Image (cartoon, rainbow, N blue to C red):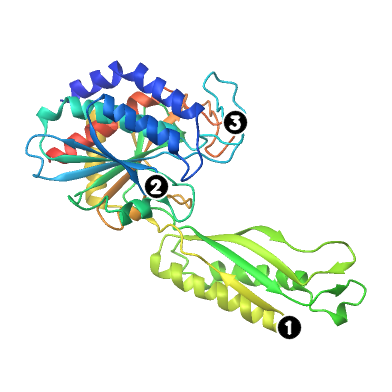
Amino acid sequence: MIDQIRTKAEQYFPEVQAIRHHIHSHPELSFQEYETSSFIAQKLTDWGIKHQTGVAGTGIVGILEGKNPGKRCIALRADMDALPIQEANTISYRSQNDGVMHACGHDVHSSCLLGAAKILHELRGEWEGTIKLLFQPGEEKHPGGASLMIKDGVLENPKPEAIFALHVYPHLPYGTVGFRAGQYMASADEVYITIHGKGGHAALPHQTVDPIATAAQVIVALQQVVSRKANAFIPSVLTFGKISGGFATNVIPDSVEILGTFRTMDEKWRYEAHDWIKRITQLTCEAYGATATVEIPTGYPSLFNDPALTAQAEGWGKEYMGEENVKTLSPRMAGEDFSFYTHHVPGCFFRIGTNTDDKEFLAPVHNAHFDINENALKVGVGMMAWLAYRAISS
């Protein structure tokens, strides 16, 4: 079976590459993936793969049935959305939509899942059970397409015993894959603070309540959340990326907005930290005569790779790739909405190397110059198909 999958991954590489070029050149923002969804659905139709469209808006659920479909079920997931970035590459398949680009590799993910689906469908006489194919919208935007797909029932009827997803990784060379068991990526919550003061003339500060000066004290005070309130063994990050307020050099404004993000690997501490952020902000503002409005909408949870499943997947990866080409990943404080699935069913989120080699680094994700070594498509297609086959057959 492994040789069949390797052969087909190589055989279908030109077709998967063409699929990737089409999706890359027609990127669409989160929850607006109409053309992308239609294109993917047409491929599934052409290949005779049953599927449902309109899930969570633009999402698709494909169904592959082997022998004895009711025996067990697993799921494979790929995201479809692009980012609001103007592509700087001059490649033939560069984005045709101004200000929108597949800078995080979701075009690669969807193409790899399509390629794996074609292989598994053709080999359906070689395995038993049902494989769900989740083509998901809106990974890059709150509340995350994964949460909406789950609400629409993609993890039910039948419920998968396991779910897998891959992600491009330019920090690894082409021809390698990476796994990490347990906590791998952080929760990601946005922090919105508005400080309300009393505006006036800059030369008469005693007649005002200065929200800018208060904002400075709030930002400094909030550094205590991570440095003094968090357990030192729990990874945590609190970063403020935007301060907005004021009109001129001689005007003290009425209010200031502070925008940031809080990330951690521990779900219990996550919500304790939310309380500390609100409390410290409000008490600091009170000390300076101001008030505050603090909103921390619940974002993506931390991504937890099931240890037993991930250990199995790593072993299967070594079978397919060779032991020397399977790496152990370091934890990342970035967020990923695949995490929603991992809090419902055992999940394994792994990486495929997309760099040219160990020395030449093409560009990081979320960068206007991002691209991949396209031979990585063969790895992605083959690994997804192999992991699915091993999982459904174990």
Q: Is residue 393 rendered to the left or right of residue 76?
A: left
- Quarter the C terminus occupies: top left
Amino acid type, residue under disc 2 in the picture: Gly
Mark 2 surroundings: few (<14), some (14-19) or many (≥20) residues within 10 A: some
Residue that mark 2 sits on: 57
Q: Residue at x 53, y 25 (%)?
A: 360
Q: Position of residue 264 (x, y in %)?
A: 46, 61
Q: In which quarter of the image is the N terminus?
A: top left
Q: What residue is shown at x 39% (from left), y 24% (from top)?
A: 19
Q: Distance between the residues labelled 1 and 2?
A: 46 Å
Q: Is residue 217 above or below residue 358?
A: below
Q: Quadrant of residue 391?
A: top left
Amino acid identity at mark 3: Glu
**Whole-number angstrom distance, CA of label 3 to CA of label 2:** 26 Å
Answer left or right for 285 relative to 138: right
Q: Mark 1 points at which residue?
A: 289
Mark 3 or 2, nearer chain start: 2
Local SS, label 2: loop
- Read off the residue under disc 3: 87
* Residues at circles 1 and 3 in contact by the CB criterion of under 8 Å: no
Whether residue 283 is visible, yes or no, is yes
Residue 336 versus residue 135 in the image, above or below = below
Q: Are marks 3 and 2 in contact (CB under 8 Å)?
A: no
> In the image, what residue type sits under mark 1?
Gly
Direction from residue 229 to residue 303 in the image, left or right: left
Q: Find numbered disc 3 in the image and state the secondary structure of the residue it sits on.
A: loop
Cα distance, mark 1 to mark 3?
Answer: 47 Å
